[in-house]
Image: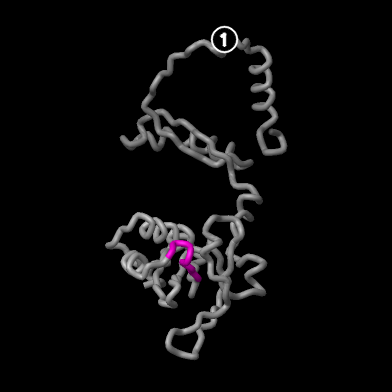
């Protein structure tokens, strides 16, 4: 606790309370008193103590306003560590830096429906569409393609991981929801469910965390 910035006085006081407290007393039900107060939530850092002292000192001045004529109570949350700031990265996976195309993630039940390819043949033409992104079953924010055994394509889009959208298509076909895309063709052709193949055509990301929906439309 000392290494995390807690004052040594507070640590010693808490240690003494824990040492002399009897377990039987701690297990007894206690009545809680509800007081009307203003709760100030702060991250617990080495700067917390000066901030709380300043607020307590200035609280009588703030109490001149009706909104602040209540008891001041502090609550603390864990501050951000270096690990928290390094957790998320906007860089692509290492494998995506040197590889393009669509492939299996290797960890889900939808890998068997995956079309492992780096290009898409264009029907009724000798041309091909080259995939310029790396993608797998977990890629989100995509325009995707579903191929049936008669080499017809269905094009769709989703902001969620592609495997979730594929699971919806599979469920619709399995339960014969005729109003859903693909189902009527799959049932009248007929095709087997295991013959469905999908691939990601394009990936859209937003490093600032905004809505990518307009990019897909």
Residue toward you, 155 or 16: 155
Q: Residue at x 64, y 17 (%)?
A: 17
Tell me residue 148's x, y (percent): 43, 72
Outermost residue on the right side: it is: 3
Give the total number of marks visible in the rendering.
1
Vertical placement of 119 versus 26: above or below? below
Tell me residue 170's x, y (percent): 42, 59
Q: Residue at x 34, y 65 (%)?
A: 187
Residue toward you, 204 or 9: 204
Outermost residue on the bottom side: it is: 126
Vertical placement of 61 versus 95: above or below? above
Q: Is residue 64 left or right of residue 161?
A: left
Q: Residue at x 72, y 38 (%)?
A: 3
Instruction: Pick the quarter of the image with the C terminus.
Output: bottom left
Q: Is residue 9 left or right of residue 60?
A: right
Q: Is 43 inside the magenta-drawn segment?
A: no
SS assignment at label 1: helix
**Residue 39 found in image quarter:** top left
**Residue 133 found in image quarter:** bottom right
Tell me residue 164's x, y (percent): 45, 57
Residue toward you, 83 or 105: 105
Tell me residue 32's x, y (percent): 43, 18
Instruction: Pick the quarter of the image with the N terminus.
Output: top right
Magenta range is: 192-199
**Residue 25 found in image quarter:** top right
Q: In the rendered view, how is the structure colored?
A: one colour
Q: Residue at x 67, y 74 (%)?
A: 98
Q: Would you name the residue on which mark 1 appears?
A: 25
Badge 1 density bin: few <14, some 14–19, many ≥20, Cα 10 Å: few
Q: Is 194 inside the magenta-drawn segment?
A: yes
């Amino acid at each position: 606790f000392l290494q995390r910035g807690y004052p040594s006085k507070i640590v010693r006081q808490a240690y003494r309370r824990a040492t002399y407290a009897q377990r039987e007393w701690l297990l007894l039900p206690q009545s809680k008193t509800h007081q009307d107060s203003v709760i100030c939530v702060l991250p617990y850092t080495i700067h917390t103590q000066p901030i709380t002292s300043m607020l307590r000192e200035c609280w009588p001045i703030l109490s001149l306003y009706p909104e602040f004529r209540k008891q001041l109570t502090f609550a603390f949350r864990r501050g951000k560590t270096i690990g928290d700031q390094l957790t998320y990265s906007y860089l692509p996976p290492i494998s995506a830096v040197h590889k393009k195309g669509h492939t299996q993630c290797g960890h889900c039940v939808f890998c068997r429906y995956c079309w492992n390819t780096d290009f898409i043949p264009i029907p009724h033409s000798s041309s091909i569409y080259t995939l310029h992104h790396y993608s797998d079953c977990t890629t989100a924010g995509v325009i995707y393609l579903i191929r049936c055994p008669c080499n017809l394509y269905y094009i769709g889009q989703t902001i969620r991981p592609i495997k979730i959208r594929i699971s919806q298509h599979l469920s619709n076909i399995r339960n014969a929801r005729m109003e859903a895309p693909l189902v009527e063709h799959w049932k009248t052709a007929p095709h087997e469910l295991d013959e469905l193949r999908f691939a990601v055509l394009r990936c859209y990301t937003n490093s600032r965390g905004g809505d990518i929906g307009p990019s897909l439309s």
